[in-house]
Image: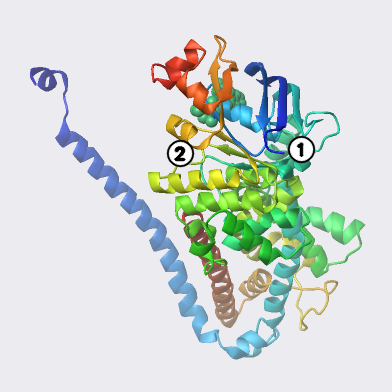
Amino acid sequence: MQQATTLFHRRLRLRKGVGDVFHILFLLAVFVGIAGLLTLLVQVLVQGLPWLNWHFLTSYPSRHPEQAGLLSALVGTVWLMVLTAAFTVPVGVGAAIYLEEYAPKNWLTRLIEVNISNLAGVPSIVYGLLGLTIFVGWMALGRSLLAGALTLGLLVLPIVIMASREAIRAVPWTYREAAYALGADKWQVTKGVVLPAAIPGVLTGTILAMSRAIGEAAPVLAISALVYLTFVPTSPLDRFTVLPIQIFNWVTRPQDEFRGLAAAGIIVLLVILLSMNAIAIYLRNRYQIRSEG
Amino acid sequence: MPGSSIIEVKGLNMWYGNFQALRNISLTIPRHQVTAVIGPSGCGKSTFLRCFNRMNDLIPGARVAGQVLFDGQDIYAPGVDPTEIRSRVGMVFQKPNPFPKSIFDNVAFGLRINGYQGNLAEAVESSLRRAALWDEVKDLLHKSALALSGGQQQRLCIARAIAIEPAVILMDEPCSALDPVATLKIEDLMRSLAEDYTIIIVTHNMQQAARVSDTTAFMTMEEDRAGIVVEYGPTSELFANPKDKRTEDYITGRFG
Ligand SMILES: Nc1ncnc2c1ncn2[C@@H]1O[C@H](COP(=O)(O)OP(=O)(O)OP(=O)(O)O)[C@@H](O)[C@H]1O
Ligand SMILES: [Mg+2]
């Protein structure tokens, strides 16, 4: 015991003091974040709630604030999400399957992998301009939903690919081994064992990607321009607008009433976003329970 | 034809990259019997077992030289499809690895991918019966297989393997994750399955090898860690009077 007391200078008091200081600092950091968010939320709710009613959800935009609604933007957002998902999920999951299960592990594959991660960091307006050139211009799709969906699809594709790869990689090798040992070929293993086990993770990633896409204004602005639509799109080749753009439109108006409308639009957007995230969390929890069971 | 041989291994060598894992193994596996492979850890038992259904093909850098004749046909000959070999040589793994699917779908998986034309439900039931699991799971067929106990899961894996009617079943330490009661059940099962199938089992447990097997191969490592078969013969003889000093040391517990 002699040694222990002389060779160690434990300074327990000091260590505990330092620990407490950091504890308080971190708590403060959390407060700053939450307080900022709360102020925003309260402000939006106070301004927007009075405007939020059935009429608001089912009317077209108008020059008269009391008659204005966001029907065209709401329907446009739903259309855009469905089309974007229809494009991104097959391509994204397909790419993930290829990279995880089929691709040889060489420099080319690694180069592609690095670039996919990099693409996720490219500013969204760049995708907007790309879409404007390729889909609106070269492919002559016009300023249509389809052009918007393809553009947003490109934007979130890296997220879907990365989330799907992670989900596929998390499928234990022992499942694949068991399937191979039964005489399955690669595609049978992938389709019969790997994909079913990876689907919850893929879904979670896709929903998170979609909730990223839903809030994007910049690329959609490049494609659809600041339009004022008093109809709902009925086909993928129709013109469209979406919630962030409608909100942006209202914010730029001089009259105070339009700020209330913008706040009400933000509430609608937030509700959609939060529901999507809730679904993602639900799926992930269910997935964890299953894989631990 | 009991008494005849089903597999003949001739001059088998196997490498993981530059590391030689198996050296010059030759032996014949008798049909409708249980053959045990024993030996110290790392001597290449699992590697050897996986040569019988070409599972080593899945490991990058793995390479095989020599012949494994299955009913006279070399499974390593050019043009042989490993998936076809694996549907005739089934495998049960050390850790029970049912798919995260229902019990029914686990057994039906191999039937479906191999294009089974008969009645699926009947085939699943008969496989579960032969694996001595039917009575325990007949009311749970559409429940997740992951809810079963370890011993039940391993019997499910056996049912899954025999569903596609392989000629040979490879078992890599199938009881090492199980308690003694579950182990005895699997051992009984192996004895009864040997009437219809040829079984090759890797085990660390020498009592188990003595209890269940008709023939035993003892493996060990050479200086460069390559695995070799030292002694091969009827289990009773190998255990009662081993011819090789290394076998004797191992089975009397002086080594490994
Ligand atoms: N995938 C692999 N890549 C490279 N070397 C491997 C691989 N698998 C096994 N080996 C090596 O091959 C040798 C034999 O391994 P193997 O797993 O066949 O031994 P084993 O006799 O089954 O051992 P245990 O009784 O511990 O299961 C070991 O030296 C091991 O390190
Ligand atoms: Mg082993």
Q: Secondary structure at mark 2?
A: loop
| Three-letter code, disc 1 | Pro
| Chain identity of mark 1 | B
Which label was assigned to residue B168?
none
Based on the displayed image, in which of its 4 quarters is residue B104 positioned? bottom right
For the point 67% across and 65% down, which residue is it? B122
x and y percentages locating residue A180 in the rendered image: 69, 44
For the point 54% across and 15% down, which residue is it? B221
Q: Secondary structure at mark 1?
A: helix
Q: Is B109 on the left or on the right of B186, as rendered?
A: right
State whether residue B35 is above or below residue A290. Answer: above
x and y percentages locating residue B250 in the rendered image: 44, 19
Q: Is B90 on the left or on the right of B42, as rendered?
A: right
| Chain identity of mark 2 | B
- Say few, some or many: other residues with alpha carbon within 10 Å of mark 2 (under 14 / 14 to 19 / 20 or more): some
Q: Which residue is mark 1?
A: B82
Residue A134 vs residue B167, the one in the foreground? B167
x and y percentages locating residue A285 in the rendered image: 48, 61
> Disc count in the image?
2
Residue A229 vs residue B166, the one in the foreground? B166
**Outermost residue toward the left in this view:** A2
Residue A53 seen by the camera? yes
| Ligand 1's quadrant | top right
Q: Which residue is mark 2?
A: B176
Q: CA distance from mark 2 to mark 1?
A: 28 Å
For the point 45% across and 42% down, which residue is it? B177
Image quarter of the N terminus of chain B: top right
Q: Is mark 2 within 8 Å of ligand 1?
A: no
Nearer-N-terminus badge (2/1): 1
For the point 71% across and 56% down, which residue is it? B111
Residue A271 vs residue B126, the one in the foreground? B126
